[in-house]
Image: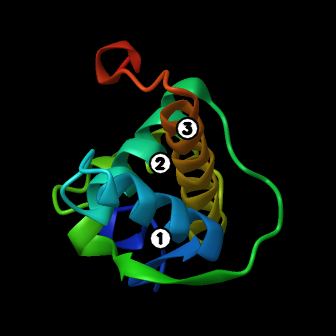
Amino acid sequence: MNDESNVFGDARVIPASKQAKAKMNHLKSKGLFKDLGDIWRLGAALGLLLEKSFKEELEMETFENINSLDPEGILAATMIGLYPDLSPKERMMLLVEHAEWGINEIHRMEEIGTLDFTKLGL
């Protein structure tokens, strides 16, 4: 059985695309979020909840330490529960794909004026 320390293998940092970073910075600059990690976590949660992921191949960059983004291990536990048969690397990349989709969706809703935190279903 996998313990939390092996959920994402040797990975210590979470990547994010340049596009996602730009969208998160835009949302933060609007005063909607205190920090980029909050946006990333909400994006990941939204993608997981709606079973959506962004599959387009994007250039990824280092974003943030796993322990900073998931200090209680909630995302790790969710990913191992939902995807026990994936390899740690596949599990990490799928979490990133869920987050990328969610970040895009949050940004899209903000751009068209439909972002309503009470209706996100979280």
The one nearer the camera, 93 or 5, is 93
- N-terminal of the pair, mark 3 or mark 1, is 1
Q: Residue at coordinates 18% horizontally, 63% vertically from top-left?
A: 71
Mark 1: amino acid: Phe
The answer to whether residue 89 is left or right of residue 1 is right
Residue under numbered circle 1: 8
Query: Which numbered disc covers residue 93?
Result: none
Proximity of marks 2 and 1: CB atoms separated by less than 8 Å: yes
For the residues labelled 3 and 1, the Cα–Cα distance comes to 33 Å
Q: Residue at coordinates 57% horizontally, 60% vertically from top-left?
A: 96
10 vs 80: above or below? below
Q: Residue at coordinates 57% horizontally, 25% vertically from top-left?
A: 50
Residue under numbered circle 3: 111
For the residues labelled 2 and 3, the Cα–Cα distance comes to 30 Å
| Location of the C terminus (image quadrant) | top left
Circle nearer the viewer, 2 or 3: 3
Q: Estimate how packed mark 2 is, as few (under 14), some (14 to 19) or many (20 or more) residues with alpha carbons within 10 Å.
A: many
Residue under numbered circle 2: 79
Mark 3: amino acid: Glu
Label 1 SS: loop
Residue 12 in sight: yes
For the residues labelled 2 and 1, the Cα–Cα distance comes to 9 Å
- N-terminal of the pair, mark 2 or mark 3, is 2
Residue 1 in sight: no
